[in-house]
Image: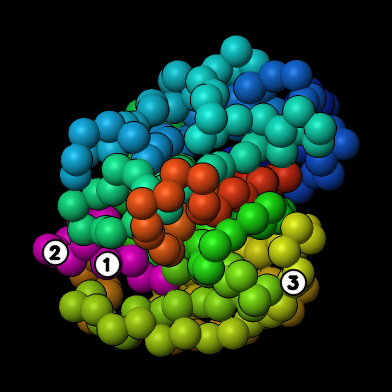
Amino acid sequence: MRLRALLAFVAVPALLVGTAYSAQAANPAVAPGGNFDLSVWQLQEPVGSPGSPTTISSSRLQGSNGFQDSYFYTDKKDGAMTFWAPEKGVTTPNSNYARSELREMNRSGSAANWSLSGTHKLSATLRVVSVTSNVCVGQVHLGSGGSSTKPLLELYYRASGDIVLGTENSPDGGQTPHTVGHVAVGKTWSYTIGVTGNTINLTVNGTTTHYSIPSSFNQYKQYFKAGSYNQSSSDSTTKGARVAFYSLSVSHS
């Protein structure tokens, strides 16, 4: 079985592929692409024209001098890759909420679009710096295979400190929440979202839970997303969700 693992932190050249590293390895003086492997991600920001948020290609994100702005940047204190999503911002046609969020891509530049067969993992170490009410920090989203624009699952962090997994009941909608942990705002935590066949394996701070995937999703391909997908909206550009990532990696086998 051939494993394709993609490293998040690349600040130290000798690091082994697929390993998570502490924030101390990050350089706070460079763009996120100088500390993270962003060759397999595309960024969507809460700006642009109505219904058409601006996207930043992986080629623009890569390297120490790669793209960064007020919505996506390196924290100057600890080197974290930071996402800011205000309550007021440009949204996609199928959402009322703004986001600063990465979308998984292939190294070739095409959009990632993998089947449920095999083993697929998204792993992250992060902290929610601030949140108004609720923010999605990781997703498995439906790709090709039908007309649904729903996610397979979303991992939320709520202002109460609760970490909640939302699993979709079918491609037509209807989400079931599962409380899977609790961490105070501003504290660092970790997750791994794993998909193996028709099973979701979620690990939060070392505790793993399992959930069945309904067969109605079998026809769909999937892809990962991670960042700050705010789950509240208003006319405020100062309230919102700010999320800092210290490691981020995906693997497929």
Left or right, 151 with respect to 121, comes to left
Give the mark nearer the N terminus: 3 vs 1: 1
Q: Disc 2 or disc 3, which is closer to the eye?
A: 3
Residue 109 location, quadrant: top left
Q: How crowded is mark 2: few (under 14 residues within 10 Å), some or many (20 or more)?
A: few
Q: Where residue 96 sits in the image (x, y, percent)?
A: 28, 59
Residue 240 belongs to magenta span: no
| Residue identified by numbered label 2 | 146
Lower sequence index among marks 2 and 3 = 2
Residue 155 shown left or right of residue 45 in the figure:
right
Q: In the image, residue 146 lies at what x, y percent? A: 14, 64
Q: Residue at x 29, y 43 (%)?
A: 90
98 shown above or below 184: above
Q: Which residue is drawn at 76% across and 28% down?
A: 76
Measuring from the top left, give residue 226's x and y in whole percent. 51, 51
Can residue 139 be seen by looking at this rendering?
no
Q: For mark 3, give the secondary structure.
A: loop
Q: Which amino acid does label 3 sit on?
A: Val
- Magenta region, residue range: 142-153
